[in-house]
C-alpha cells in the first residue's frame, strides 16, 4: 500500500503517547504521504516541534495566527487540501472540543473547517475513556461521520491497566488506508440495501416498530459506494443521514419497503436486506386516534417476507439476509438461509451487550448456501460492512458467477 500524492494532517495532542505520533509520522512519510503536523500547546510539552519538522520536512503548525505562514487563513487552505486529518493521540479534552465545535487553537479550528475524512485515535486513562461524558462525545463525533478508533487495552501511563492506550501506528494506518484508497472492486455493480426498522400504524399517532437504528445498513451503503457501486438505499425511519451519492428511498411500512425493493430489483446485482422488517402489521389500523383506557385487542397479520420474495424472483442478484438471534445462532441461521432460499445470511447474537441493535460495533457469523460458516471478530460496523462485501465477491467468484448472471 502506498500513499503517494496524498496530503495528510497529523494532529498531536498532550498525552504521553505523543511519542508514538513520531513513529506514525515516520511510517506515513515512508509510505509516500505528505504530512503537515499540527501540535497543540500541551503536545509540545511532550515532544518538541523540531522532531516533527525534521521527519515531515515541513513547518509544524502550532499557533492559529502563525507569523511564519504566508497564508493568513492557512487553516482553511489546509482543511481544503488535506485528503484526511488524523489526530493521534487524541486526549479526552480534544475529543470534547471537537464534539462541541470549540475552535480555540489551530488543530480544533482545522477540525471545524475540514470537509475531509477525520480519524481520531484516542489515548487516555481507562477510567476516562469509560466516563459517560467521553462516551457521549465519541458517540456525537461518530454520528457525524468521524472515525473514532477504539483505544487498545493494556498498561497505561497511570500505572493502571485498562482500555485507553493509543492504537498501534499500524492499526491507524490501516484505517487511513481503507479510507483513502478503497479498492474499486464493486465498480459496475448495482447494489440495493435495505436498512432500519419499519413502522406499522395502529392509528394516526401510534405504531408498532423495533429497535433497529439502521447503522448496519447505512454502513453497507456507504462501503459499497466507496468501492465503486451504484447504490439504492431503501430505508425505514432512522436518525441517520443517508450517503449523498446513494439513491435514497425512504419508506415507513413493510409493504412500502416491499414495493420499493421490487421496483429497484431490475438490474440489481446484489441485494442486501439489513432492515429489521416488522413481522406483523395491524390488520385494520384505525383512521382516527384510539381513545380510552379499556383493554384493547389488536388483530395482527403477517407482513410479506420481502427477502424470500426477492430470492424466489430469481432476478439474478446475489441475495443477502440478516438474522437477529438470541440462541443457537448458527443452527437457526442456517435454517433461515435454507427456508428463504438466499445466498448469504449475516447472523448476530442480539443477546450480547455492545453489538447488534443500535450499537456501533457488530460481531457476526456469515453463513452461506455452499455450506460455509465464518465467524468475524467484533468490529466497527463500517469494518463489518467491508467484510460482508468482500465475502459476497469471494463467494460469487467461487461459485463461478459473474455480475448480473446467476447460475441457479
Ligand atoms: N425480512 C424481510 N421481510 C420480512 C421479514 C424479514 O425481508 N417480512 C428480512 C430481513 O430484512 C432480514 C431477514 O429477513 O434480512 C430476517 O429474517 P426474519 O425471518 O425476520 O428473521 P428474524 O427477524 O430474526 O425473525 P425470526 O427469528 O422471528 O424469524
Image (spheres, rainbow, N blue to C red):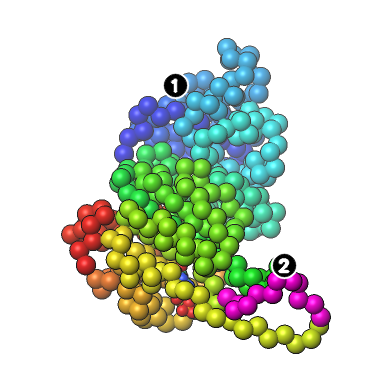
Q: Quadrant of the C terminus?
A: bottom left
Q: Which mark is residue 205?
A: 2
In the image, residue 54 lies in the stretch drawn in magenta = no
* Residue 324 percent coordinates (x, y): 48, 73
In the image, residue 286 lies in the stretch drawn in magenta = yes
Identify the residue at image location x=67%, y=57%: 131
Q: Are marks 2 and 1 in contact (CB under 8 Å)?
A: no
* Residue 127 percent coordinates (x, y): 64, 58
Q: Which mark is residue 168?
A: none
The answer to whether the beta carbon of the residue marked 2 is less than 8 Å from any atom of ligand 1 is: no
Q: Secondary structure at mark 2?
A: loop
Residue range in magenta is: 281-292
Mark 1: few/some/many CA within 10 Å (<14, 14-19, 20+) = some
> Given this view, does label 2 or label 1 mark the residue nearer the observer?
2
In whole angstroms, how far apart are the C-alphas of marks 2 and 1? Answer: 62 Å
Q: Earlier in the sequence, mark 2 or mark 1?
A: 1
Q: In the picture shown, does residue 264 fall above or below 111?
A: below
The answer to whether the beta carbon of the residue marked 1 is less than 8 Å from any atom of ligand 1 is: no
Reading the image, the residue beneath label 1 is 57
Q: In the picture shown, does residue 358 fall above or below 84?
A: below
Identify the residue at image location x=47%, y=65%: 258
* Residue 229 percent coordinates (x, y): 36, 46
Main secondary structure found in the magenta portion: loop
* Residue 309 percent coordinates (x, y): 38, 70
Q: Is residue 396 visible?
A: yes
Count all numbered tags in the image, as a single digit.
Answer: 2
Q: Quadrant of the N terminus?
A: top left
Q: Is residue 403 left or right of residue 119?
A: left
Identify the residue at image location x=71%, y=67%: 204
Image quadrant where residue 328 sits: bottom left
Amino acid at each position: 500500500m502506498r500513499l503517494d500524492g496524498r496530503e495528510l494532517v497529523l494532529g498531536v495532542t498532550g498525552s504521553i503517547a505523543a511519542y508514538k505520533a513520531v513513529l506514525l509520522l515516520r511510517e506515513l512519510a515512508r509510505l509516500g504521504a505528505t504530512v503537515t503536523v499540527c501540535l497543540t500547546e500541551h503536545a509540545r510539552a511532550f515532544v518538541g516541534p523540531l522532531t516533527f519538522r525534521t521527519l515531515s520536512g515541513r513547518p509544524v503548525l502550532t499557533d492559529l495566527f502563525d507569523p511564519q505562514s504566508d497564508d493568513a487563513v492557512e487553516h482553511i487552505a489546509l482543511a481544503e487540501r488535506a485528503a484526511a486529518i488524523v489526530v493521534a493521540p487524541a486526549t479526552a479534552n480534544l475529543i470534547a472540543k471537537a464534539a462541541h465545535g470549540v475552535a480555540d487553537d489551530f488543530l480544533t479550528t482545522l477540525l471545524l473547517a475540514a470537509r475531509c475524512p477525520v480519524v481520531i485515535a484516542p489515548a487516555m486513562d481507562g477510567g476516562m475513556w469509560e466516563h459517560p461524558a467521553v462516551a457521549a462525545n465519541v458517540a456525537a463525533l461518530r454520528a457525524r461521520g468521524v472515525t473514532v478508533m477504539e483505544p487498545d487495552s493494556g498498561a497505561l501511563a497511570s500505572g493502571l491497566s485498562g482500555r485507553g492506550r493509543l492504537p498501534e501506528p499500524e492499526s491507524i494506518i490501516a484505517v487511513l488506508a481503507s479510507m483513502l484508497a478503497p479498492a474499486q472492486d464493486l465498480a459496475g455493480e448495482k447494489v440495493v440495501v435495505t436498512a432500519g426498522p419499519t413502522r406499522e400504524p395502529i392509528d394516526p399517532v401510534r405504531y408498532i416498530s423495533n429497535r433497529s437504528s439502521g447503522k448496519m445498513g447505512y454502513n453497507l451503503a456507504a462501503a459499497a459506494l466507496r468501492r465503486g457501486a451504484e447504490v439504492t438505499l431503501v430505508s425505514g425511519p432512522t436518525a441517520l443521514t443517508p450517503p449523498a451519492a446513494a439513491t435514497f428511498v425512504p419508506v415507513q411500512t413493510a409493504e412500502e419497503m416491499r414495493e420499493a425493493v421490487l421496483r429497484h430489483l431490475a438490474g440489481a446485482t446484489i441485494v442486501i436486506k439489513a432492515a429489521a422488517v416488522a413481522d406483523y402489521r395491524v390488520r385494520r389500523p384505525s383512521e382516527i386516534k384510539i381513545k380510552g383506557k379499556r383493554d384493547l385487542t389488536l388483530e395482527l397479520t403477517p407482513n410479506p417476507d420481502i427477502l424470500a420474495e426477492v430470492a424466489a424472483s430469481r432476478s439474478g442478484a446475489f441475495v443477502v439476509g440478516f438474522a437477529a438471534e438470541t440462541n443457537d445462532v448458527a443452527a437457526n441461521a442456517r435454517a433461515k438461509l435454507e427456508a428463504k432460499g438466499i445466498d448469504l445470511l449475516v447472523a448476530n447474537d442480539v443477546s450480547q451487550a455492545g453489538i447488534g441493535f443500535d450499537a456501533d460495533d457488530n460481531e457476526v457469523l456469515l453463513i452461506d448456501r455452499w455450506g460455509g460458516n465464518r465467524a468475524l471478530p467484533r468490529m466497527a460496523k463500517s469494518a463489518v460492512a467491508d467484510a460482508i462485501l468482500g465475502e459476497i465477491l469471494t463467494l460469487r467468484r467461487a461459485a463461478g458467477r459473474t455480475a448480473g448472471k446467476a447460475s441457479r
